[in-house]
Image (tube, rainbow, N blue to C red):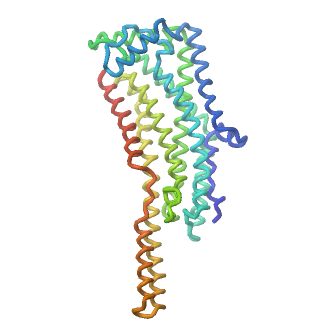
Amino acid sequence: MTSAELALRAYDVDPLFRWFQRRRLPPRLLLLSLPVQLVPLVACSGFDGNLTLPGFPDVARADFRRLVRLGAGSPDFSVPLVRDYPSLINVVIAAFTLLLAFENCRRIADFPSGLHARGLILVPPHSRTTVRIAVMRANRWFAACGRHSWAVALVSLAVGGLLSGAYREGGVFLWLAPGTDDEARREWSMRAYASWWASPEAGGLTGPVAYVLVASGIAYVIIKHNFMGLCMMSFFFAIRKDVAYVFDTANPDGCHGWKAMRDLLHGVVVSLLISLVGFCSLFLSLSVRQVSWTAPFLLLFLLCVPVFLLVPLVLLRSGTKRYREQEIARLQDCFAELRQRASPGSLEQFEIARVERREIAVIRDGRVRLFRVKEVVATLSIYVGSVVTTLIGILDR
């Protein structure tokens, strides 16, 4: 089986990615999505007079002290665009997530074929047909995601609309409300919603429409990125019993030849974590009753982070374990044959036994470790910290 037969057409997952790839455009051009999102927000909020407010630096400092519970907060309930911190954070995060998603798409496309070319994936003759079918199925799924981008856009639009409706249900930015009296803070939150740049009460429909469209674009990028990861994982899950994963005992890259997988998982984890931080910043603005509007989407996203990290590692560990068992059995047979050819009790037999123990130990002790302990700790800290902070902020309303 050739490496070309293992190529995944991951770029088909989205028309924009396919267009970029065919024209070989620099991926950094995708960062232009940042001004593409910001311009309509600034234009709409500026048109309605809701772009900024007098004395904003002082208000921002008071908001920060309130966020970390080191101050009473600002009594000013005006929420122009510059004070909508979650929305601005998510616009920036969405632009970088789009770039990371494209880079991950490139890594996925080259991943199985590159491993096969380096001899790290072995496809036995009796499994080649099954693996070819799995490749074609995965590529059909990538293409289906691209063809049904309109459906993803509709779902994203619904998510944006639900988020906007959730704010209308119970006010905005309760976490910025000054004081300790619950009733007074809820009243501040409702007045803040009336002045919020994306509220119909603040200046007509231009702000709400711009907010829903931008929120939908952010949701679209995240949904497509998750679909791309699911297509890739389903492929490797389908071939888990049909291939053997080999590791390079020389360990030239510190990952026993699997640095490509390390880079891919790093890109996926980083993009998912920054998206998680963005989502959690949005949900900090909501109360328990409001969160129920979009909780299923958030729950699905939270589950994807550990799934995308753990499933590939489990599959790799299982595949390399099977390789170790088969390779050790093969070495034992080879050395048994060499011992039979040597004279009984000769130095040659002792040397053969010594080399056998050394070679088997190298295979037996070989482990593909893609992440260092500090990287695992950092990832878990960001993930757990974001979730716990969001839950505490939501429940403390």
Above or below residue 350? Residue 164 is: above
- Which residue in the rendered view is the most extreme toward the bottom? 343
Q: Residue at x 43, y 71 (%)?
A: 325
Q: Residue at x 30, y 9 (%)?
A: 184
- Which residue in the rendered view is the most extreme toward the front? 347
In the figure, residue 154 lies in which quadrant? top right
165 vs 108, left or right, is: left
- Whole-percent x, y for residue 320 in the image: 46, 63
Above or below residue 271? Residue 309 is: below
- Whole-percent x, y for residue 163 in the image: 46, 24
- Pick whichever, 183 or 319, lies toward us: 319
- Whole-percent x, y for residue 201 in the image: 48, 8
One can see residue 245 in this view:
no
- Whole-percent x, y for residue 353 in the image: 41, 82
One can see residue 86 in this view:
yes
Above or below residue 369? Residue 167 is: above
